[in-house]
Image: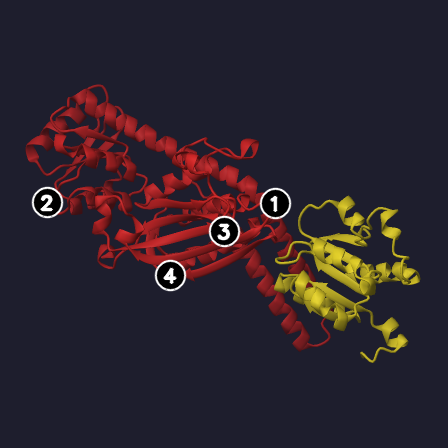
Amino acid sequence: MDEGSPRQFVVRPRVLVVDDEELVRLVIARQLRLSGFDVFEARDGLEALARLPVAAPDIVLTDLNMPRCNGEMLCAEIKRRHATANVPVVLMTGGPLDETHMRDIGCAAVLYKPLIDRLDEFLLSILQDAAPASRPGAWAAPAKGPVRQPPAA
Amino acid sequence: MATETGLRVLLVEDDAAFAGFLGIALRTGVEPAAVDAAGDLISALEQIRQTRPDAVVLDLNLPDSEGLATLRAVLAAAPQMPIVVLTGVADVEVARQALQLGAQDWLLKGHLDADVVQRAIRYAIERKQLTDRLVQAQKLEIAGRLANGVAHEFNNVLTAIAGSAQLVEDAADAEARASALELLRRASRQGIALSRQLLSLARNPPVNAAVVSTAGLVDNGRLLVQAVLPSTVQLEVGPIADVPVRLDPGQFDQLLLNLVLNARDAMPQGGTLRISVTAEAAHAAAHESEWASRDPLYAVVRVSDTGVGIDPSIKPRLFEPFFSTKGARGTGLGLAVVAEIVERFGGAIHVESRLGAGTTFAVCLPAVSESAEE
């Protein structure tokens, strides 16, 4: 599956799922695998950063509230690194959150837990929007529009 | 015996003549009460169990129990009981300690008439009801401060439940289905544990004292503790000694959460919060009072933070009701209620703090020995 050929890349998008809640992470990972994603997992932002080079995700789905390095710090770091600056980051949270600030740090979308039914379709739609822009420097778009909301379930 | 006020008072006094005098004083006058009598601790405890009096008038020196140990035994059996202690002139210091332990008032033998005794009992009952209301009312404050974290926690559980239900639906074969169902069950159990915990916190008085293990208490409280901590605060739990103590689990949660919320607020930039329980000998756990030396073992629950520390100048006022350093964010009830709860169960609380280094609150709860449990 992971030979890295362009075709494989298109067929099985790679997603890094970051959440310190084991059950949440397990369930989301399994759902996305069933939907055809190659799924990598991390328990917090630090672990996620360490896994980035190997996982080489097309998209990162991360919880906000985590120990050591939270989702906000993770997102900012992903955007800061040249190699990953174009990878869309989707933040999940079970609590309130400052969406304007999240847009400012480059987050592509915000999801509120409990999550929508078709998480896979939502991530794919983000990936499709991001795809034409997957050239260095082109990922400035989120600052112009509102943070994306999931479609009504 | 039915009376006009309906008050029922248990009189515990081994001096028959004095008991007779007090009995008359209580049965007559403006507020006559029904009086039961006991001449020693064992029968007093038995009567409390059977007749549930409204108040106890307690001589501390009985044939089978001496001094403050007598009071502690009654408080342990009936933490919600208003108690008026009887002392001699020589024992004023003991009387003062009795108030600290949780007695409502004390009467000096030889300086009594019916009015004084009756008024003392009326006041004792009212004072006890007031502190009960204070403890109960403060739960609302905690509930408000918990709401955010708990909603967050429930949303996580719901994410896992909704997601694993979807996995059950999408399961391709029996094995995938079984493993998805197991995830669903685990998520449900987490949700159930969380809601139980909230309910135990919200439960109303009367106080439900039971012998419980400290390990179980901390384990149960952990979910709520985790819920109120931001990601910048690292929670470390341990070591946890398993010591049997007698208290109300809901009130222990309230106590623990108050200390945890304070620790959290002391670490605005993040830090480490540690909860531990150790079994310690009395002399180490409670240094000041004479009663401590009679109890061999305490469960010492410590909540430590690496926060800003407490200014030594305000330390004497920490447990004062309505004293707060948090301005509009605090009601000043948290630590006052902690002190009240600790007192109810015959414990003590100590604070160690260094500015800029952190604070440790140590709650010492008397361990329940096998023999005391019969």
The mark lying in front, picked from 3 and 2, is 2
Residue on which disc 3 sits: B197
Q: Do labels 2 and 1 share a chain?
A: yes
Disc with the residue nearer the chain's start (2 vs 4): 2
Left or right, residue B133 beside residue B262: left
Disc 3 on helix, strand or loop?
A: helix
**The N terminus of chain A is located in which quarter?**
bottom right
Query: Looking at the picture, how far across and down is residue A71, in whole percent?
Result: 70, 56
Mark 2 / mark 1, whichever is N-terminal: 2
Which amino acid type is shown beneath numbered disc 4?
Answer: Ala
Q: Chain B takes which shade in the image?
A: red
Do the residues bearing badges 3 and 2 touch, measured as CB atoms within 8 Å? no
Residue B63, numbered label = 2
Amino acid type at mark 3: Gln
Cα distance in 3D space between marks 3 and 2: 43 Å
Residue pointed to by mark 4: B241
Per the image, label 1 sits on a secondary structure element best described as helix
Say which of B273 and B157 sits in front: B273
Q: Colour of chain A?
A: yellow
User: Sequence order check: which comes first, mark 4 or mark 3?
Assistant: 3
CB atoms of marks 1 and 3 within 8 Å: no
Q: Do the residues labelled 4 and 3 touch (CB within 8 Å)?
A: no
Residue that numbered label 1 is attached to: B148
Q: Is mark 4 on a helix, strand or loop?
A: loop
Q: Is residue A108 left or right of residue B268?
A: right
Between disc 1 and disc 3, whose residue precedes? 1
Q: Mark 4 lies on which chain?
A: B
